[in-house]
Image (cartoon, rainbow, N blue to C red):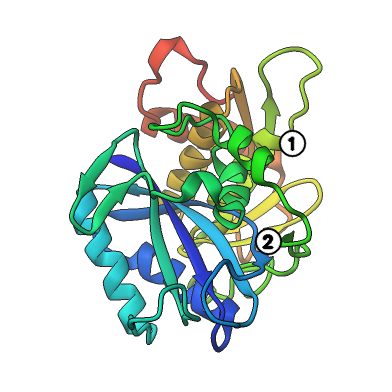
Amino acid sequence: MADAYIGLGSNLGDRERQLAGAVAALARAPGCRVTALSAVYETQPVGGPPQGAYLNAVAQLRTELAPRALLELLLSIEREAGRVRGATRDAARTLDLDLLLYGDRVIDEPELRVPHPRLGERAFALEPLAELAPGRLHPVLGESIATLASRVRDPAAVRRLAPGASLRPGRSRSTPPPARGTRMAIVAVSIAPLGAGTSVSRHVAAALRVVEGQDRVRYRLDPMFTTLEGPLPEIFELILRMQEAVFETGAQRVSSVIKVDERRDREVRMEAKVSAVEAEIGAARPARRGGAKKPS
């Protein structure tokens, strides 16, 4: 398995729908899992003939595909979206998918160069990438993504859209409700970050990106907690992925408070269910490296 970062862009047709369709296609592809999504940015075209503004974003994948196979997948998704590659360089396009990074690999082959050869100079790719991987080092330039982004930042040309403008149709998934009797969970994730007084915002954001980057469990994002609805095994898997994402941001401890409910009994008390559910999660959770604490 490898972490890969995919740049997404569109400036023809329904731009937001094109990007959302690409994310859905990546999530459906065998051997791929979308683990995080950046915000969407509206950006001015770079080079090429006169054309309209782009929407850009970055998706993080956990993938079993080799770099060449992943590139072929991206090209096939572009074709399905109506992308026609012509002789004009940097022309407008319905969908543009770029393999920005593939782990720490450096690849220079015909039609396949990783990192993307122009990543270090493209604010429209670096800004969303810096949201997901600010401390990651560019394998060739040796500088962090955050440093590279700060060097080319241009708020007039790369504008982060309001929170409501995203790759998702809204803050709540519209997946069909589970059948009556399916057990539900209400999950509140609290984060103890590395170092006293450190802001928790980036740790919480990492967990929420995992929730928003999937479509198998219905969710609602509230100010104090996240409501998850769906089969308990899938909810447990999602919670574990949220916790792993937070540990990867440097947090030393993750605490998950869980209320398990059933659709026909919404008022069941949290205290009566927490111990049993946490025991199930603890049994399912793989052993962490370095002796990190399990959820409490």
Residue in the picture at 42% in, 11% down: 290
Q: What kind of residue is marked 2?
A: Arg
Graded by Cα atoms within 10 Å as few (under 14), some (14 to 19) or many (20 or more), the crowding at tag 2 reads some
Does 259 appear above or below 173? Answer: above
Left or right for 14, reference 282? right
Residue 169, percent from left and from top:
63, 75
Residue in the picture at 63% in, 42% down: 149
Mark 2–mark 1 Cα distance, whole angstroms, equals: 18 Å
Left or right for 66, reference 119? left
Foreground residue among 282 and 119: 119
Foreground residue among 185 and 121: 121
Residue in the picture at 24% in, 54% down: 112
Between disc 2 and disc 1, the foreground one is 1
Does 14 appear above or below 180? Answer: below
Residue 221, percent from left and from top:
71, 57
> SS of the residue at dot 1?
helix
Let me know if residue 185 appears in the view. no
Circle 1 is placed at which residue position? 201
Q: What kind of residue is marked 1?
A: Ser
Number of the label disc, if any, that sits on residue 220: 2
Let me know if residue 14 appears in the view. yes
- Count numbered badges in the picture: 2
Indicate the quadrant containing the N terminus: top left, top right, bottom left or bottom right.
Answer: top left
Residue 115, percent from left and from top:
37, 44
Left or right for 184, reference 105? right
Residue 128, percent from left and from top:
60, 52
Number of the label disc, if any, that sits on residue 16: none
The earlier-in-sequence mark between 2 and 1 is 1
Using the rendered view, name the quadrant where residue 157 is placed: bottom right
Indicate the quadrant containing the C terminus: top left, top right, bottom left or bottom right.
Answer: top right
> SS of the residue at dot 2?
strand
Residue in the picture at 55% in, 89% down: 13
